[in-house]
Image (cartoon, rainbow, N blue to C red):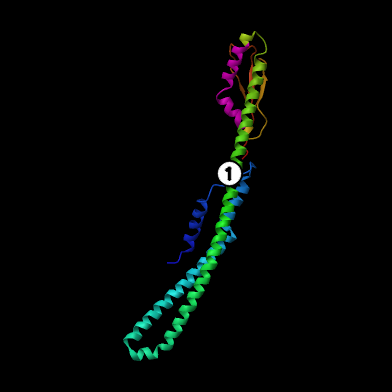
Amino acid sequence: MPLSRWMLVPMLVLGACMDEPLSPPPPAAPTDAELDAVCADRVSSSAESAAIAAQDRVDGIASRLSDREAELARLEQEMRNDDKRAKAAKAERDRLAGEVDALQKELSGAEKARDTARSELVATLRQLDQKMAEAEAARAEADQQRSRAERGEWSAFVSGAKTQICDRGTRKRHARCHEAVESALSGPMRGRFDACTASEQAVPELRQLGKNDPLPEFGERIPDDRAFTSKGWAVVFCDPSLPEVE
């Protein structure tokens, strides 16, 4: 039974995905638009269209061949049962036999063309799979690099806060103050800090406020701790309403 166009492409995609693993991709970060373009190529590939068209041609010839073979079989059965019918129908039988022979040759050629188109499609799918694998690996590498950069920015911020808040006292008092600063900046403040850096806005700023100074917009006070050697600190964050950069 001839394969339909809807059976052809999934079978070829499955075959391509079962090949050997791809070589490691270069760490170049793709954009979402580039990934979408790769996926669009998979759907609208000329190789895919050619393979489907070739399969359609095979299906059409096979269907005509099946009809002619059935018609020829019925005629030959009638000719075996009726001598008069056999003489009268000989020319018709020869015509049908000729059509069957021609269709068989045409089908053979169409199948060869179909197989060539399928091979080209498999090669195209492999190339697209490699492009998509490279793009996904590059995106993962970019995410890892951004995560490392965010961790570095946070560490630098906390280190700077320790230096400013714990500006005097003995070494022992400094150690207690440093622990208190780390505790005060953990939790929600870390999340807000990461949100600012992820959206590529200004890095949050540590400020010391006077007794009667108002809290800046998007600012959050750091609760004074008895271990702090200076008081009245706040962190000024970015605008939380702005969307995160993709």
Residue 50 at x, y percent in the picture:
56, 64
Q: Look at the image and give the residue range highlighted in magenta.
A: 174-195
Write the residue at 61% across / 12% down.
Answer: 175
Residue farthest to the top? 170
Q: How many marks?
A: 1
Q: Secondary structure at mark 1?
A: helix
Residue 54 at x, y percent in the picture:
53, 66
Q: Quadrant of the N terminus?
A: bottom left
Q: Main secondary structure of the magenta part?
A: helix
The stretch drawn in magenta includes residue 182? yes
Write the residue at 63% across / 22% down.
Answer: 158
Residue 102 at x, y percent in the picture:
49, 78
Few, some or many residues within 10 Å of mark 1 (<14, 14–19, 20+): some
Write the residue at 67% across / 13% down.
Answer: 167
Q: Amino acid at mark 1?
A: Glu
Residue 59's place in the image compared with 191, above or below, is: below
Q: Quadrant of the C terminus?
A: top right
Residue 238 at x, y percent in the picture:
64, 30
Residue 204's place in the image compared with 113, above or below, is: above
Which residue position holds label 1? 136
